Image: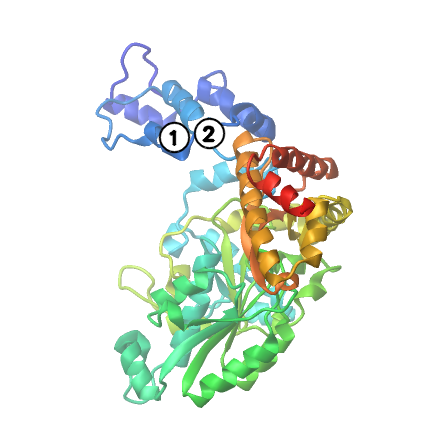
Amino acid sequence: MITSKRTAQATPEALHRIFTIAEAPDSTLGRIEQEISHNLIGFLNNRIVASKNALTDIEQDFICPRIPEQPEFVSDHIHHLLDKLVAQSVHTASPSFIGHMTSALPAFILPLSKLMVGLNQNLVKVETSKAFTPLERQVLGMMHNLVYQEDESFYQAWMHSAQHSLGAFCSGGTVANITALWVARNKLLKADGDFKGITRSGLFAALQHYGYQDLVILTSERGHYSLQKSADILGIGQDSVIAIETDENNKIDCQKLAQKCQQLSAQNIKILAIVGVAGTTETGNVDPLDKIADIAEQYQCHFHVDAAWGGATLLSNKHRYLLNGIERADSVTIDAHKQMYVPMGAGVVVFKDPSSVADIEHHAEYILRKGSKDLGSHTLEGSRSGMAMLVYASLHIISRPGYEMLINRAIDKAKYFAKIINEHEDFELVTEPELCLLTYRYVPTSVQRLLSAADAEQQAELNLILGKLTKFIQKRQRENGHSFVSRTRIKVACYNDEKVIVFRVVLANPLTSKETLRDILAEQCLLAQESENFLPQLLAAAKV
């Protein structure tokens, strides 16, 4: 790159070298690249420290708003990034990082990512992507087939049709959900006679033309917050997302869903969509999709399944049945950057009907011309990277049986963790794992006995203190940096549907071992003893 060790200068020659000459293997960047390629986990283990710096302290390293007037040597800047950025990043690949839906990545992803970035294809337009466009269309076909399992002739007819699309690649589940509901809205309020449709005339005129009092989206109270974002962006308002109560297994109550549909219809309020959840973010449960499909058919509304997390379970022949009914959905969201182990920024929405995307089709004179196979004409996002290449490679290298093995092991691991939690006298399992998520909390055995005999008011008081203890343990565990679990607040049936604070874990990382899980529980027991306020209060209450 810039080689002078005295003063770095932004000269035409130096800039030319930046774009044309790679770092030598013995240079700082070259050595780091080799180390990362050879052993990424080891590199991260050595570089990421258990930093106890507060976020406000880290912000001081990134506070200058001025663009530099002098260039830096690559080696100097790399050291700056290692010390200030990498060292204080989150070690999401660690086997003991089990708090969120991120995981270690397969080793082959690194060189393929470098190739993808180097090619720098823009999937909005065939002129800027060429071979990447049919590749992405094939991957959409593979994901569509995973959900709907149509015959070969279906995909030969529709996969590469310029006027149709089996789905869309997105940056994540949020944009995928927005895209699905955007299609649903435009299809419902399409052009009709002299009415030009919502895309031209707007929501108010559309409601007037069709005679609806309002539009709503129905989902369970475990529905993802991206649905509120969708309603906001689509102009129907966040309050139009109606949360239906869940049962004791965190699944939508279909009887209450049907009652709400009947009530809304009587009020001339049109149900835009019912959204089933296949893998809730907090507990990993799957709604009864077949029953929801029946209700959606009865009320003639769009049926969308948010399977951002659980959709990959379809790759497992053993557990695919958990998502029975998903094939009846009009649209389905799946995040490849979750249980399909590709980097962040790979969401997918697929549509049962390949002509559905016509309702959101956009064109321009200089790009996305009618009749072209440009992917951007059917996507919310314009410029996009070639992330489909990494999904394509993963599907071939890991293969469906490989993914099945990963998914089956993750579910088995969650069941093992639930088992040792149940066997431990000082822990309470709050939600049983259906996929590979579960929730639990630290409750000393004497307090468990007290809770079981207490009335509702006493339970509420104890759960308040237990919630503070859970927060204490979770924050201290994160600060110590040896392991990480997240926390959430959920309604628990055995406590009169009171909301309680619990630990939440996601067991998708293939590197997480049974020993890791036992160590995490042991650490939480030790951290509980460090509480100077909450644990003594609980133990004192138990003695009384």
Please, which residue is most extreme toward the top here? 6
Q: Which residue is mark 1?
A: 58
Residue at 52 percent of width and 48 percent of height: 389
Q: Residues within 10 Å of mark 1 (few under 14, many from 20)?
A: some
* Amino acid beneath label 1: Ile
- Would residue 471 be visible to someone looking at this image? yes
Query: Do labels 1 and 2 touch, CB within 8 Å?
Result: yes
* Amino acid beneath label 2: Gln
- Would residue 403 be visible to someone looking at this image? no
Rendered location of residue 367, percent (x, y): 31, 59
Q: Which mark is residue 140?
A: none
Rendered location of residue 441, percent (x, y): 64, 47
Relative to 303, residue 212 above or below: below
Q: Which residue is mark 2?
A: 88
Q: Residues within 10 Å of mark 2 (few under 14, many from 20)?
A: some
Secondary structure found at label 2? helix
Q: CA distance from mark 1 to mark 2?
A: 8 Å
